[in-house]
Image (tube, rainbow, N blue to C red):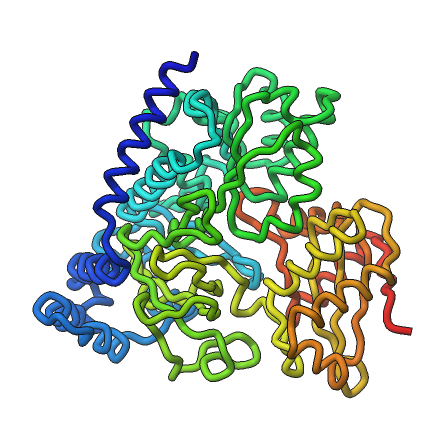
Amino acid sequence: MAVLGSLLKRGIGLTGTVIRQRRVNGYKSQRKAFIKLLNKARYTAFGEAYHFEEIMSSALFRKDKQFYHLYRQYVPIHDYNKMYSEWWHRTKDGEKNVTWPGRVKFFALSSGTSEAASKYIPVTKDMVKAMQRTSIRQIIALSEFKNLSDELFEKGYLMLGGSTDLKFSGRYFEGDLSGINASQIPFWFERFYKPGKEIARIRDWELKLEEITKQAKDWDIGYVVGVPAWIQLLLERIIKHYNLKNIHEIWPNLEVFGWGGVSFEPYRGGFEKLLGRPITYIETYLASEGFLAYQARPEAKGMQLALNQGIFFEFIPFNDENFNGDGEVRPEAQTLMIDDVEEGVEYALLISTCSGTWRYLIGDTVRFTDKRRGEITITGRTKHYLSLCGEHLSVENMNRAIELATAELGISIPEYTVAGVPEGALFAHHWYVGTDDAVDADVLRRLIDEKLKELNDDYAVERRHALRDVKLTVLPVQAFYDWMAAKGKMGGQHKFPRVLRKMMIQNWLDFLHSASYEVEAVASK
């Protein structure tokens, strides 16, 4: 009998009950978080430049929302380029008290999925602590999942992420956020943490997978965490190495997969083929800028925002009034606090955090599934949608079309990307689909097109007018992994972009040609 696990689960459940009983509303939590952020940053260069003292005084001594009106008036919206060129480059050069008190010890390297060059995102000590607190909240939320066994709370937690052997520049350490987090895990968690410190330090992704595979037989894993593509790749490798039928033959107590960053649906079919029995899936929203949300209950359709953990959220309705055709925010864009949002509306996300990001356009779009609980689902990226001629095709639409098409054809498509291309004087979409299953490319092309017409009225209209054609190229899944390897983006939090824009289209085509992949496309007859 799992006595320790039973006690841990019971303790977690009691803690969760206390937290639920004292839960406050989203607006109050966010106002409190806002005051804490400005109080700490008011004497930084950024805080003094943008009148944080005045804004904070308004939040402290007035009961209305004047503080937010002042915040919008004084502080402009920042994307990464603006934040870095005006402020973060000073932080990176070792200057202290720029956008957050003190010097920054860690920088998370992130290219997102839309930029070619690496971004340097500051990760402060306060942010590390905030992410740890949110992680504990997520563990506490496990008490809501009644199907989980007591034994789970004694088993290993496999976290597949970037190297903890961070590169030291002379002033700061840099690396993948997952590597930074793993290098800072609390001592009490070390007994559960896999793959352990030695393997976690390995930078070479292939070598890391090889070492994990060798050690897998000696571990009793109950919980796996990581990006779906890389976890699936690892499980496939372990199954093949030990000649197994499924992963439960070596890890019989595996019960939970925690994932985030992408839609899981394109991976679900292939992933579940690797299992011996059903497991529980728990979604998280962990970005390089912070731990933003997590699934707090099994029946939830979305993730609960971390409203009181060092992050202040703002929401921009994602429409033509607030964004141009390239997904860039307009200077006069409307912004809202959490109490003014509506369920079912798509919003671009702005965050201000204890890492010194201020009114920062993170690049994700979300939709509230439960406003009262502060629960959201990620719908895509501000620059990862196609609207060449008004079709307004979102990543959410694309994922759903792929999900429906694969279910109908009985195949798995774990990776895909779409490019908008000229078609004479009009336009076309070119899909590059990764699957190792046999499929008729033209049947798949027509099926995806039909599903998108059903899902998106604007797309259906434009398919009769300016969006003249849909093309599709079927590639082996390995082609997508090879491209990421060529870019140095294997493993960690790296994800293949769902939409290719501008130079990325030519880079992708050049890679396919150089790697001798067949790129013949099927199109409308």
Percent position (x, y) of residue 321? Answer: 47, 84
Quarter holding the C terminus is: bottom right
Percent position (x, y) of residue 389? Answer: 66, 83
Percent position (x, y) of residue 16? Answer: 30, 37
| Residue 97 can be seen, yes or no | no
Query: Which residue is situated farthest in the right direction here?
Result: 525
From the viewer's perspective, tell me whether residue 298 is left or right of residue 359.
right
Query: Which residue is situated farthest in the left direction here?
Result: 61
The residue located at (45%, 77%) in the rendering is 329
The residue located at (53%, 74%) in the rendering is 327
From the viewer's perspective, tell me whether residue 407 is left or right of residue 359.
right
From the viewer's perspective, tell me whether residue 135 is left or right of residue 32.
right
Give above or below for 70 relative to 292: below
Frontmost residue, 174 versus 239: 239
Frontmost residue, 1 versus 384: 1
Q: How many badges with numbers are in the image?
A: 0
Percent position (x, y) of residue 416? Answer: 70, 56
Give above or below for 502 relative to 476: below
| Residue 444 can be seen, yes or no | yes
Frontmost residue, 435 versus 4: 4
Frontmost residue, 470 versus 501: 470
Give above or below for 299 relative to 425: above
Give above or below for 292 relative to 500: above
| Quadrant assignment, res 78 | bottom left
| Quadrant assignment, res 177 | top left
Query: Which residue is situated farthest in the top direction here?
Result: 1
| Quadrant assignment, res 132 | top left
From the viewer's perspective, tell me whether residue 142 is left or right of residue 502.
left
